[in-house]
Amino acid sequence: MFQYELHKKIKELCLTHLMDIAGADHAFYLRMIANANTLQDLYFSIYGNTGGNLSVFHASAKSSGESKSLQAFENILTLIIETYKQRKPAFRKRDTLKEQQGAWFASNQITGMSLYVDRFAGNLKSMPERLPYLQELGVNFLHLMPLFESPEGESDGGYAVSDFRKIDERFGTLNEFKILQEKMQAAGMYLMIDIVLNHTSHQHEWAKKAKAGDKKYQDFFYMYDNREIPDQLDATMPEIFPESSPGSFSFVPECNKWVMTVFHHYQWDLNYTNPDVFSAMLENIFFYANLGVDILRIDAPAFIWKQLGTTCQNLPKAHTLLQLIKHCVHIATPGMALLGEAIVAPKEIIKYFGTDAFVAKECDIAYNATQMALQWDALATGDTRVMLAAQHELLQKPLGTTWITYTRCHDDIGLGYDDSMIAAAGFNSYEHRKFLKEFYSGNYPNSPAAGALFSVNPKTQDARISGSLASLCGLEKALAGDLVSSDSGLKNDSELKNETPINAANNPAVQIAISKIVLMQAQSMLLGGIPMLFYGDEVGYTNDYSYLVDPGKSYDNRWMHRPVIRWEKNELRKVAGSVEQRIFSATQQLIQLRKSITAFSDQKNITWLTPHNIHVAGFIRHGEGKHYYCLFNFNNKAAYITWYLFKEHGFAPTEVHDCWTGKKQKVGPDHEYLVMEPYQFAVFELR
Ligand code: GLC
């Protein structure tokens, strides 16, 4: 419906802000008008009650006592206009280019890495010196882990922010951040940072004022005088960090109240029922957008709305809030895409891309956390059926959106896929998860993995898994000579402990670990979505146990897989045959392979293969009239697959060309076999 009053108001605001609505600012004005009704509906469905069709700027709405929310909405419109006005011409130009490309983030040309600036390069100032290393690898997109001020020791790796605008002194200054952004942009790189939307540090000025008794700021959080409501909420809210921060509330002695703290006791949940919280956080989002951020990672969006009697996760209003944010961003700073970090059950993850009228109008990108965990599942069991059973959910992802695909990140691995998927593969879900946890924490007899259980819930026995890619794939134990009779087939050999890197790489257990690392990376890179490497994995960093002696970290074993880069180790990538060189160059080649074939961009151009062998996962990527069969043997034994596999989708190839090894093979008779070595993968182009 044409909402005359609303459009009139927008025009008025634009003119007051000296916008050239028929000239230079016309595209912005069009976006604003085109999205105004939806924006208004979204805003008022959370913060107003004028109901459906009546324009909120209509005189009768004003007289019905809603002037406060009207004013708040007008302030949002003004904020959007001001944000656009302050946007640097270079960023506006980049916005236009990205808009012309459509879903630019679905390209096969983008490869990311997530890293802690201090642990990778020392500080922001030294970061530019490290860009050539990343370029050598093929990385052109960086997720810089949280950089804004966060109290040391109570920081949750930067996810407890005490000032959303001030770079923490540990990392440097805002100016150094801007210099890095400019250098990255000049080098054709993309940038991602976080907005920690769900909570602030208890040292944030809002929290400090709340502690001092300021009612306005107490309303920024969920604060209660007694345990009545907290007890009711605790009854249905799952615990996130049950070991280190049990329950979802903490007592605040300064004001004698209970405050909601879903994560750690020092992370106070923001109260988004309060429109002031929304507008203050939207201002922060826009502040980041105008720093030239290409993708904004919305931390923990599943938690941003709370309601009694629910788990307080994935609630419909959380989605409405995200849609509202998406529309504001789309109008003011359209080049900035949104990544929703929702690490939740597969059918819930999909909803973060938007549903119904909002399909592909909520988060542009989400983590394919299900696939990530299922790769670890397949690697431990050698069986790919659970992975296959999950795909019908994951394939629901709408066109125009994409995944972050990854094997490891700074967080733990949660086994959050559905029991029904495990059951579909014929396993008992409890026993299956128990096996995986024991396998990766190294407690299963002869397990090659060296990880640890994270956040064990003593009540439910739920647990997640910590550990670096290399350690979970067996490299740590293999290098230490600790593999007695694992799937490496090795006997314990204490001499291995003293091997040089080159000799070590020739040790069969080490070779198997490297094959597993490359297999895991290959599947996540070829699947579709932006591959996001985790720093250090490209040269096989194993777990770092030094966190145990740091009281600010020892309670959180995720630090074992957040290495401090030793550049002399990374230099070994240049030593032919070393472990570092083998992993680095395989990763580099994978990135190049993906970049060289358009079929690896994400256009919903994937077909999963029905299993011909339960140990081998496979999918076809289609593009430019070509079809690439990507096959991954997750087993420790050779796998046999009938050649018919290449024909059942209606193709009739005579030859397959493995784009990974460069080897060609004649397609044999239907009943004869293609043989895949243990942990081998292949990218067969049909010829
Ligand atoms: C996200 C982050 C995680 C953090 C949590 C709370 O899940 O990835 O590291 O602990 O949010 O902010």
Image (cartoon, rainbow, N blue to C red):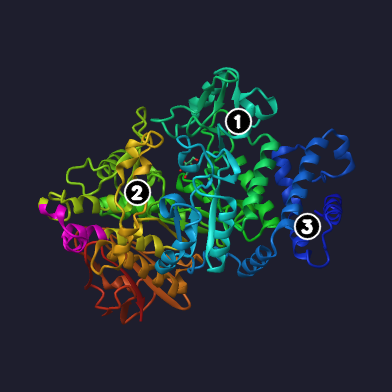
First in sequence: mark 1 vs mark 3: 3
Q: Give the distance between the C-alpha atoms of the residues marked 2 and 1, in whole angstroms.
A: 47 Å
Report the residue marked by disc 1: 207
Left or right of 492, for residue 670: right
Where's residue 247, x and y in %? 46, 27
- Residue drawn at point x = 77 percent, y = 44 percent: 75
Q: Give the distance between the C-alpha atoms of the residues marked 2 and 3, in whole angstroms.
A: 49 Å
Where's residue 212, x and y in %? 63, 23
Q: Is residue 417 magenta?
A: no
- Within 10 angstroms of label 2, few (less than 14), some, or many (20 or more) residues? some
Range covered by the magenta-colored residues: 495-515
Q: Amino acid at mark 1?
A: Ala
Residue 256 vs residue 619, the one in the foreground: 256
Q: Which mark is residue 570?
A: none
- Residue drawn at point x = 37 percent, y = 42 percent: 558
Q: Nearer the viewer, mark 1 or mark 3?
A: 1
Q: Which mark is residue 33?
A: 3
First in sequence: mark 2 vs mark 3: 3
Contact between marks 2 and 3 (CB within 8 A): the answer is no
Tag 2 secondary structure:
helix
Report the residue marked by disc 2: 424
